[in-house]
Image: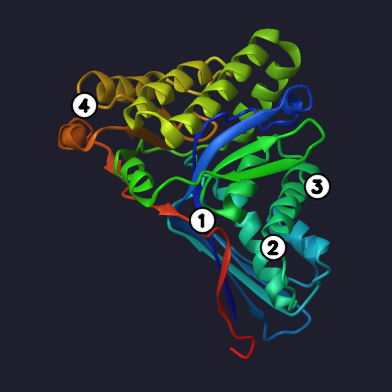
Amino acid sequence: MIINRTPFRISFAGGGSDLEAFYHQHEGCVLSTSINKYMYLIAHPFAVKKQIQVKYSTTELVDMPEKIKHPIIREALKLLKIDKGIEIASFADISAGTGLGSSSSFTVGLIHCLKAYLNSHVSKEYLANTACDIEINRLEEPIGKQDQYAAAFGGLNFISFLKNGTVCMEPVTISVDRKKALEENLLMFFTGSHRSASKILKEQKENINNSEDKVKTLLEMTKLARKLKQVLYDGDLDDFGPILHEGWELKQSLASGISNPEIEKMYHLAISKGGASGGKLLGAGGSGYLLFYCPKTKQAHLRKTMQELEELPFQFDDHGSNIIFYDKNI
């Protein structure tokens, strides 16, 4: 049995600039961190050697990869030329469609698990690149590259997307105390709904191709990502919240459905009455988790203000995708 653990991520600023439609014309960048909420993938030899069994929200039993309905599992098995005698299962700390990059964490973790099953050691760069290939090229999902790299590498990173398609990882190396202070000033609340990012990202991609104003907005968002990075290195940490807020205001103009009246009501309450200095809805938008920057002295009040929403306690993750158990005799 082989067990892989791959983290989910929080993206602070720059999201959308990792779409090919943008970074082929302008360099994109995001500031993000992985967190201690994980996707788990399990692989082991299947008792029926001529079949494949796949367990996720349903169970599939097939005699060839091409018959698997789960698109990511199907394409990963085809790519790695695994055609029989394997069982794959998955579970996660958090449900899909909540803005934490779960799809890419699944893809990265699956590739890592399957390569270990094949007795092959791979780099984090390979995991991220291959996950992008499966999701963007083979399945033609209208997504960017940030989630795959955040999941594979882990940690607090400034990620750049160059015009030639190269992705550059820059770990944000700040003191343990400063990193802990940032972590302790962030709170996350679940809005109570899920969504698929594809529709919003597809519209966003089309808007980038057809609207100069949307491109200008994304350029401003990349400036904010760089500004946040500089705050972490040598600025006032309490500037983090207002910059998050500025980014959220910009992001809402990129596509319809990124926000809605209910999300706006919750966000406004947190800022106007809860003591948060800024925040954003994580992921492509529409639902999922609200993230807020709130000084520790005001957090009790914020929690009371947001008491109708479930809080998700979290810490930063520094390790990325890992094989946490390996014994092919089990």
Callout 1: helix, strand or loop? strand
Residue at which label 2 appears: 111
- Point out the tag, 2 or 4, that comes first from the N-terminus: 2
In three-dimensional space, the C-alpha distance between marks 4 and 1, rounded to whole angstroms, equals: 29 Å
Q: How many numbered tags mark residues here?
A: 4
- Point out the tag, 2 or 3, that comes first from the N-terminus: 2
Labels 4 and 1 touching (C-beta < 8 A) = no
Callout 3: helix, strand or loop? helix
Res 61 seen here: no
Label 1 sits on what residue type? Pro
Badge 4: few (under 14), some or many (20 or more) residues near its Cα, within 10 Å?
A: many
The image position of residue 329, as x and y in percent, is 63, 91
The image position of residue 67, as x and y in percent, is 78, 62
Horizontal arrangement in the rendering, residue 181 relative to residue 223 (left or right): left
Label 3 sits on what residue type? Arg
In three-dimensional space, the C-alpha distance between marks 2 and 3, rounded to whole angstroms, equals: 14 Å
Instruction: Quadrant for the N terminus, please.
Output: bottom right
- Point out the tag, 1 or 2, that comes first from the N-terminus: 1
Instruction: Quadrant for the C terminus, please.
Output: bottom right
Residue at which label 4 appears: 274
In three-dimensional space, the C-alpha distance between marks 3 and 4, rounded to whole angstroms, equals: 45 Å
For the point 46% across and 35% down, the residue is: 282
- Point out the tag, 3 or 1, that comes first from the N-terminus: 1
Residue at which label 3 appears: 138
Residue at which label 1 appears: 7
Looking at the image, is mark 3 or mark 1 nearer the viewer? 1
Callout 2: helix, strand or loop? helix
